Every structure is written in structure tokens, then in C-alpha cells.
Image: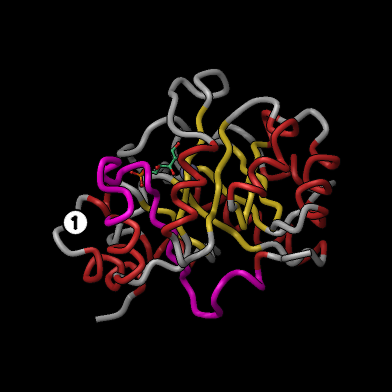
Amino acid sequence: MMSARQILPSSRPVISPSLLSSDFARLAEEISAVEEGGADLLHVDVMDGHFVPNLTIGLPVIRAINKYASKPLDVHLMITNAEQYLQEYKDAGADILTVHQEACTHLHRTLTAIRDLGMAAGVSINPATPVSTLSEIIRECDLVLVMSVNPGFGGQSFIEHTHSKLRELRSLIAESGSSAVIEVDGGVTKDNAAAIVDSGADVLVSGSAIFGADNYRDYINAMKGVQ
Ligand code: DX5
Ligand code: ZN
């Protein structure tokens, strides 16, 4: 079993650029550029046009990404029936596999199956989903992904209420003895990164901000607070 703590570097914050905002026609070059620029993970957004109102990429593209990636793949499934495809995502190269609390009826079973396949098990909650919905399965989570926008699209604005959810999640993790790390996804930029880390985030996902920057390294360094 591979916990998120074994996959993540020890320094904070961990940066996971969302490839959704990269140039898909030059994906291999974009992967190298963010890896050389200091990315710790590569965030891959899978959308099914059903759980979220958008379609992105799936298994064949993840296999292709995995051929060129050196950093671990942080796969965010925004799909229903995720439990049917866990082995396929493992085979495609996922290191962290995150499912949505709102899209999984038998969440305990799904998280356990992800761990049994040797991946770190993540669960994500939408902005409208309370942290308390995780209280019974927090020990089965290696990572909790707090959505700070409504999932479906890059380039949206960070929802400020996320800060109080992060503090509540931090307490839940500490009280339960879970070793889960906290990831935040949506509207994260160099300007709000430090405050998000202060509220409890370990991992920052960022798509449009990093891939929209002139220099990926400078931008990632700014997110990490490195001058
Ligand atoms: C949204 C995705 C995000 C998205 C973030 O549903 O889960 O990973 O790519 O993009 P930005 O950083 O542009 O908000
Ligand atoms: Zn995502």
C-alpha cells in the first residue's frame, strides 16, 4: 500500500499543476516544462459530462502522460461509477486516485479498493458538501481534495468559504488519527497560496495560473514562497 505521505515530498506546499490548462497538442513538452519548473505532482482531471458538465480526457491520454511523466500522477476523477475502472486507472499509471464523495454510493468500499490496488486513495468534496460527511471514512483516506470551485472547468475564482472548511478538516484529521493530507483545487494562484496553506492545505492544485504564466518556474517558486 502506498500512502500519499510516501508519494509526496516532505516540503510544503506540494505543487500539483493541473494539465487541464496545458497545451494538449504539446502535452509532452508541457509536462517536461512544469516538472523542470518545480512541479511535485501532475494533476489530471477526468470528467465524464455527467457528474460534471464537461468532458475532458480519460485512460488513453493518461497512459500517454505516464510515458513522459517523471513525477507521480495525481488523478482526479469527476465521474460516476468510478469503482468500475479502478484497475484501469492503476494500469494507466495513477499514483494517487481521487474519487468524489458525491459520486460514490459505497465510498468505504471504493477507497479500500483503491488502496488494495497499491494507489493512494483520495476523496474529494464539492463546495456544497460539508466536511462532516467524511467523518466515518477519514481513516480510509490518504488524501482529501477540497474543491474551492465547482468542478467542471479551469479558470474560475476561489471560493473564500473554503478556508473555514480547511480548518474544520484539519481538526477532523487530527482528532481521528487519520494520516490524510489535504489538497485544494480551483482558483489557486500565487497571490492566495500562502493563505490557503495557512488554513491547512498540504497540496495546491493550479491550472490556469501556472500554465498562463510566462515562466512556469518563476510562478511555481512564487506559489511555494521561494524568492
Ligand atoms: C476543476 C478541476 C481543476 C482545474 C483547476 O474542475 O478539478 O483541477 O483544472 O483549474 P484552475 O487552477 O484554473 O482553477
Ligand atoms: Zn482537479
Q: Amino acid at mark 1?
A: Ala
Q: Residue at x 46, y 40 (%)?
A: 61
Q: Position of residue 175 (x, y in %)?
A: 79, 64
The answer to if 6 sits in the magenta stretch is yes
Q: Residue at x 51, y 34 (%)?
A: 58
Q: Is residue 170 above or below residue 157?
A: below
Q: Is residue 54 above or below residue 128?
A: above
Q: Is residue 159 above or below residue 119?
A: above
Dividing the picture into quadrants, the one containing residue 167 is bottom right
Mark 1 lies on a secondary structure that is loop
Residue under pointer 1 = 213
Query: In which quadrant of the rendered image does the N terminus lie?
Result: bottom right
Q: Position of residue 45 (x, y in %)?
A: 48, 40
Q: Residue at x 28, y 60 (%)?
A: 191
What's the coloring here?
secondary structure
Q: Which residue is nearer to you in this view: 56 or 32?
A: 32
Dividing the picture into quadrants, the one containing residue 96 is bottom right
* Magenta-tinted stretch: 5-29
